[in-house]
Amino acid sequence: MRKLILAVLIYTALFSQSQLLSPIPLPSNTIIDLDPQIYDDDALYEALEKGEIFTFLAKSFGTKNPELRQLRQNYMALFSLKSKIFGGGALHVAFIIPYKIIGKYAASTTNSALAFLLTRGVPFKMDTIVIEDESDASLFSAIEQVEQNSFDLVVAPLTPKGAQFCCDQAIHTRLYIPTLHKNRVVCQNDMVYFGGIDYESQIETLSLLTEKNTTKITVSDQSSVSQMLSQLVAIHIDVERQIVLTKSGYYKNLIERYDDLNQSDIFLNTPVVKSSLFLSQLTLADFKPEHVLSTQINYSPLLLTLTQYHDRDTMVIASSIGEADPVVTEEIALVDQDIRFNWINYATVVGLDAIFANRMTEPRIANENFQNNSLNYDTRLYDAGLFRFVPRPLPESEMEIDEESLSILEE
């Protein structure tokens, strides 16, 4: 009997099929451009008329003609080709990393960019220029290294101080700053691009949700970003009370000093952990605000984890993160990077996508484009729901003219 069972096991092991995916990649087609001749749009049309499809595909890599680009995509789909048409040379990207200033963002931005470039299927080189801080000497040294090499793009996650220094320099390579919106610095340098979100636009949209008869309150901590957000709020609404949270994490005694927190409109301008503590202790003090409004700073799944639903059921959050290609999003997640909620990673990837779109001649993975050298984002609003962030319609501006007023103006 034992011999029979052993024989069955050996047979099963030899002839059973494995359920594991094969590590061998699927075959792919590649066109290598070996002809040094440059084709203009007329030559490309002529190649199509002669039936020289593969010549057309190899030479149309950088065309900006919309009709030719569409024809190129159609033929690529017909022959099951991706954009592995290596006629323009490898993309050469560099990162300037002030590691003592940006901390954890040093790894997340570079890893997100690396994962994105890998998903595009084009040859590239990626270098890092590591500097200690954003002192003039450190940044000047980094810019010197940039100017001595032939980079297509330099990505520099900087603070306003470092960005201002770069704006004031003579730079001949495109420099992309994903951490700041252009309105954070005074920059007339056409070679400097910005990808940060526009907090003021988010606050302006959120301010339309405030009620006329409620007390307007800002809650911030002592960080520069938090203080900046509260200052922006004060530009758009009449702030009647400002509350500054300490590092202690226990805010109930502070909250109980302000009776007008009840039925108020609160702009919560603190990071997600402090915001969660404040919201839970607001409930503990038996206060119920009319609205709790917050910008991108609290658009994080961590908020849903650290608070109970009744702590946040009147909360509305603004976000500028759009809907990127889901396949690319998941492939970036494979290297443990998030572009669904981490706006700096999202800005890094979308900026690369926008800048290299013409050269890659591939469909964009997102819809944001540059306007005046700054990525132009749409503001979206979300309710902090039971299990997820639930999209909500944008409020109508009070500045809109009603039909009666319009008829008077027409007369």
Image: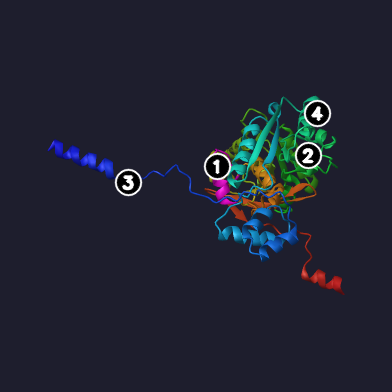
What secondary structure is found at the residue carrying circle 1?
A: helix
Instruction: Identify the mark at residue 140; answer none if there is no mark.
Output: 4
Q: Foreground mark, 3 or 1?
A: 3
Which amino acid type is marked by label 1?
A: Ala
Disc nearer the start of the sequence (3/1):
3
Disc nearer the start of the sequence (4/3):
3
Q: Which image quarter holds the N terminus?
A: top left
Residue for badge 3: 17
Q: Nearer the viewer, residue 44 or 391?
A: 44
What secondary structure is found at the residue carrying circle 3?
A: loop
Q: Residue at (58%, 45%) from the top-left corner?
A: 119
Residue for badge 1: 333
Q: Nearer the viewer, residue 374 or 151?
A: 151
Disc nearer the start of the sequence (2/1):
2
Q: Residue at (84%, 41%) from the top-left corner?
A: 189
* Label 4 Cα neighbours within 10 Å, binned few <14 / some 14-19 / many ≥20: some
